[in-house]
Image: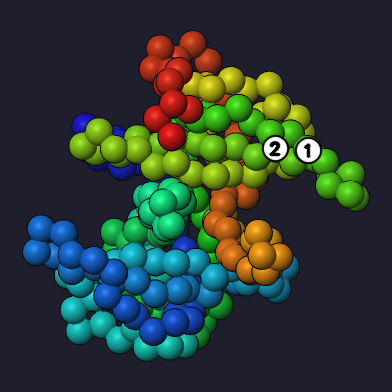
């Protein structure tokens, strides 16, 4: 049963370590560390993605800046409380990692460096909009179950005809999505007019499947958030 739940959230990324590894937290005597991974896009730009990994997976592994690795895991979320307000934080939780040294293998793997699959439920009413250039976008929040009665809440963006389709989805609708994780800078203005640059993480959806006649709807998902 646990393996089935894990299969609802699958991430595979290949990239270059772009920040020193730092201690994140400890759970049940197991230490976890975090670092950033620079993952290239096919458009020649890059996404900088946060990774969390157990100390037990990186014994005798060189995770120096500039080294390439292949990571298999999940995209997880948790709430961080800052100044009495809750903020949704995303990280790639590594379940396995492999150091890459062969240049030809790295070049081949970087042809598809960023893939994610999610099987979950619409958690807030989708927001449909168009860009100043007329491109259609729908913002989604998907709840994905994992073991021990926990869920991850993953922001997603659908484009074009997928965006038009998502506009009609209801809270609790069951969908599957395929795409990539992307990082995006945005600016937030504070009351004192100070502008702060922040980074958001989301899934850019390339393929979407709607699951009909599902009896496992999460109708009160919006209340849980």
Q: Nearer the viewer, residue 82 or 2?
A: 82
Quarter of the image holding residue 112? bottom right
- Residue located at (68% from left, 21% from top): 168
The answer to whether mark 1 and mark 2 are in CB contact below 8 A is: yes
Q: Which of 203 and 150 is in front in this view?
A: 150
Look at mark 2 in the image and give the residue it sits on.
Answer: 138
Q: Earlier in the sequence, mark 1 or mark 2?
A: 1
- Asked whether, in this view, residue 75 is left or right of residue 201, the answer is left
In space, the residues marked 1 and 2 are separated at their CA atoms by 6 Å
Quarter of the image holding residue 21? bottom left
- Asked whether, in this view, residue 217 is left or right of residue 195, the answer is left
Number of marks in the image? 2
| Residue 180 image position (x, y, % from top left) | 57, 54
Determine the residue located farthest toward the left in the rendered image.
29
Q: Which of 111 and 161 is in front in this view?
A: 161
- Residue located at (40% from left, 12% from top): 215
| Residue 59 image position (x, y, % from top left) | 18, 79
| Image mark for residue 102 | none
Mark 2, other Cα within 10 Å: few <14 / some 14–19 / many ≥20: many
- Residue located at (89% from left, 44% from top): 134
Q: Is mark 2 on a helix, strand or loop?
A: strand
Mark 1, other Cα within 10 Å: few <14 / some 14–19 / many ≥20: some
Q: In which quarter of the image is the N terminus?
A: top left
| Residue 176 image position (x, y, % from top left) | 51, 33
Q: In which quarter of the image is the C terminus?
A: top left
Residue 147 in view here: yes
Residue 101 in view here: no
Look at mark 1 in the image and give the residue it sits on.
Answer: 129
Q: Which of 102 and 54 is in front in this view?
A: 54
- Residue located at (53% from left, 15% from top): 212
Q: What element carries label 1?
A: strand
Q: Quick check: 169 above or below 111?
A: above
């Amino acid at each position: 049963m646990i393996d089935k739940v894990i299969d609802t959230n699958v991430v595979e990324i290949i990239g270059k370590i772009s920040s020193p590894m730092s201690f994140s937290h400890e759970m049940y005597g197991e230490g976890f560390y975090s670092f950033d991974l620079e993952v290239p896009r096919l458009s020649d730009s890059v996404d900088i993605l946060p990774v969390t990994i157990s100390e037990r997976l990186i014994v005798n592994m060189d995770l120096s800046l500039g080294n390439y690795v292949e990571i298999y895991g999940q995209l997880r979320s948790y709430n961080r409380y800052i100044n009495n307000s809750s903020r949704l934080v995303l990280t790639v939780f590594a379940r396995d990692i492999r150091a890459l040294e062969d240049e030809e293998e790295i070049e081949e793997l970087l042809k598809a460096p960023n893939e994610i699959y999610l099987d979950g439920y619409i958690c807030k009413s989708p927001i449909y909009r168009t860009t100043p250039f007329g491109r259609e976008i729908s913002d989604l929040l998907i709840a994905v179950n994992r073991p021990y009665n926990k869920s991850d809440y993953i922001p997603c963006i659908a484009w074009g005809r997928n965006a038009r389709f998502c506009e009609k989805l209801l809270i609790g609708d069951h969908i599957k999505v395929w795409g990539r994780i992307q990082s995006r800078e945005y600016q937030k203005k504070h009351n004192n007019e100070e502008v702060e640059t922040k980074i958001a993480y989301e899934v850019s959806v390339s393929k979407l499947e709607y699951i009909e006649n599902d009896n496992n709807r999460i109708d009160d998902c919006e209340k849980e958030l």
